[in-house]
Image (cartoon, coloured by chain):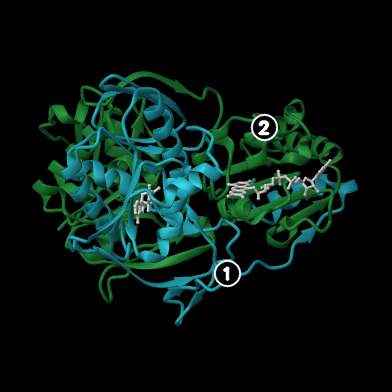
Amino acid sequence: MSVLIFAESAEGKFKKAAFEAVSYGKQVAAKTGGDAVVLCAAQNLPSSEDLAALGKYGANKVLSVALSDDRPAAMAEALVAAANSLGAKVIVVSNNYMGKSIAPALAVKLKASVASGVVSVPDTTNGFVVRRGVFSGKAFADVNLTAETKVLSITPNTFTLEESGSEAPVETFGADISQNAFRVNSVSVDKVKGKIPLTEAELVVSGGRGMKGPENWGLIEELASELGAATACSKPVSDMHWRPHEEHVGQTGITIKPNLYIAVGISGAIQHLAGVSSSKVIVAINKDPEAPFFKVADYGIVGDAFEVLPKLIEAAKALKSASA
Amino acid sequence: MSVVPDTTTKVSFTDNNTKFNTAGVQYIINPYDELSLTRALEITEAQGGTVTVIHVGRADSEASIRKALAIGAHDAVRIDADPTDATLVAAEIAQYAASQGYDLILTGRESIDYNGGLVGGLIAEALSYPYVNVVSQLEINGTEATALRDIDGGKENVKVELPVVMSAQKELTEPRIPNMRGIMAARTKPLQVIAASGAPALAETQSYELPPAKGAVKLIDAENAAELIRVLHNEAKVI
Ligand SMILES: Cc1cc2nc3c(=O)[nH]c(=O)nc-3n(C[C@H](O)[C@H](O)[C@H](O)COP(=O)(O)OP(=O)(O)OC[C@H]3O[C@@H](n4cnc5c(N)ncnc54)[C@H](O)[C@@H]3O)c2cc1C
Ligand SMILES: Nc1ncnc2c1ncn2[C@@H]1O[C@H](COP(=O)(O)O)[C@@H](O)[C@H]1O
């Protein structure tokens, strides 16, 4: 009984999400017994060296499927074919936009239980129990998955990469992909260039209404770029179109879980905190010492953002040149 | 359409952390579903057609269903079951939808309570309809839909023939607030309650836990803000 893992790639390169999924899948396989088999399905597949290198994160075998077009539905069909041929009872994907397109299709086709936003390795002592984030990070739920097959969509940036093995054997897997998988046609793709996508970022600098206006975002962007961080914002900031909506974090925006979240001029409303409170380290910068953000922050600076940010940018530059 | 606790809700649990504490909780239409509903109304107002709201839940959701009718939905269906897991909810909706032949099924990107983000994709697959998730623009031209969807690290414009299932992202449109006429009209609009088909749940929530409480914040003097970068590097080791 193997664990089947989807390793997502873009433009012929694996993403960190893929390594996390493999490393997580290996831990699941250690519990349930069987091999950790990885499937990579894309139009532009990673090199055979890169495919084999997934062995480092625990893959026992890597299957590659060349697609005529990168549709999530086609990836789902490839995964279903592989799960059926291997008799895999657990399928692991990353809970990013791609994984969210794929996981429900897998669940229906395999008559599987499905859990999204998974943050734990399953506990198999009594059933098959995984922990998942609920209420946008305000709580966790322990959920028992009762079907024979389980689809797990894991929260990015949650599991540490465990390097154990060496190279894994790579095989081409022949999956018949139906015409149905290509019903949604891509007309154009607009990738955010030269910026770290927020959902994949380990460090995030975020600005709120306290930044006063879009013309001041240079400070947020400069600090972010010095730290190698992505930028985010509060809801009113995106509502007023100071920033694009995909930067909006919180209960009605996206939920993120970076290693570091720096909130500048954000009050810390409950809806905002919902999306960011699982960040590992939180820094609040606010001129109001009573701002609710200070109650959840690890570090805080009570002060004017326009005075504090230039100092932080200087210090970040100094740190970068010291470690270069 | 799902019905969720108001976003200001302080989350807590009862019965030895096995049940969500509903005491004093206000329920609202899931914010993404308000966007779906409004966009569906805009489309039917311009091009004809009707908008049906479907909810899987108990009678206590009916105030929110009436609100959806007041916003402008033509009719509503409540499938009487406890919406305990996404598989059950989607199977019930798909079964009903199959008998109705809708051209467009809109869900939210996720319910803001359990954050599953699954129901739309599960309905699509059960009906063998294509699925487009996290859609922030949607136009219908004849039998074709064009949409802008979020993808990891960017956006994608897509084209697809109806019927299709899509999930709404913020920016799809501005939510509508019901007016007096809508509220009056909603009282007499059809709200049909149908028995569930008995689709099984495949996931059982056993218990809940709140995240561990944070220790007190360490304050750094604004005059000496550079110190923050030092502690993040040396102490927290995150940069
Ligand atoms: C249904 C619903 C859903 C919502 N969902 C979200 C969500 O997903 N995400 C979200 O963010 N919000 C959400 N909100 C809004 C939320 O309630 C708050 O209104 C919002 O988060 C406040 O944004 P803010 O902190 O940027 O602005 P404000 O609350 O106006 O705070 C600005 C802060 O900046 C500080 N400040 C001002 N000037 C300076 C300066 N010079 N230097 C330093 N600090 C300064 C102020 O002291 C203040 O604390 C939602 C609300 C509702 C009703
Ligand atoms: N009980 C329900 N009844 C009707 N629709 C629902 C229900 N639960 C979820 N949905 C729809 O599915 C979307 C995604 O929900 P979820 O998978 O629970 O995050 C919601 O935005 C709703 O549109």
Q: Is residue A249 above or below residue B79?
A: above
Instruction: Kindly identify the amino acid type of the residue bearing the numbered disc 1.
Output: Pro
Name the side, left or right, on which A205 lies relative to A29: right
The kind of secondary structure element at disc 2 is: loop
Residue behind mark 2? A240
> Label for residue B212?
1
Q: Residue at x 36, y 62 (%)?
A: A121
Chain B drawn colour = cyan
Residue A279 at least partly seen: yes
Q: Nearer the viewer, residue A59 or A292?
A: A292
Answer whether labels 1 and 2 touch (C-beta < 8 Å).
no
Q: Nearer the viewer, residue A1 or A301?
A: A301
For the residues carrying marks 1 and 2, which lies nearer the camera in this image? 2
> Label for residue B2?
none
Q: Residue at x 26, y 52 (%)?
A: B90
Q: Chain of mark 1?
A: B
Among the 4 quarters of the image, the one containing residue B212: bottom right
Q: In the rendering, at what x and y percent does residue A297 appear?
A: 70, 58
Among the 4 quarters of the image, the one containing residue A44: top left
Q: In the rendering, at what x and y percent does residue B10 appear?
A: 59, 66
Instruction: Kindly identify the amino acid type of the residue bearing the numbered disc 2.
Output: Met
Chain A drawn colour = green
Q: Nearer the viewer, residue A70 or B228?
A: A70
Name the side, left or right, on which B212 lies relative to B231: left
Q: In the rendering, at what x and y percent does residue A149 appear?
A: 19, 58
The kind of secondary structure element at disc 1 is: loop
Q: CA distance from mark 1 to mark 2?
A: 34 Å
Q: Residues within 10 Å of mark 2 (few under 14, many from 20)?
A: few
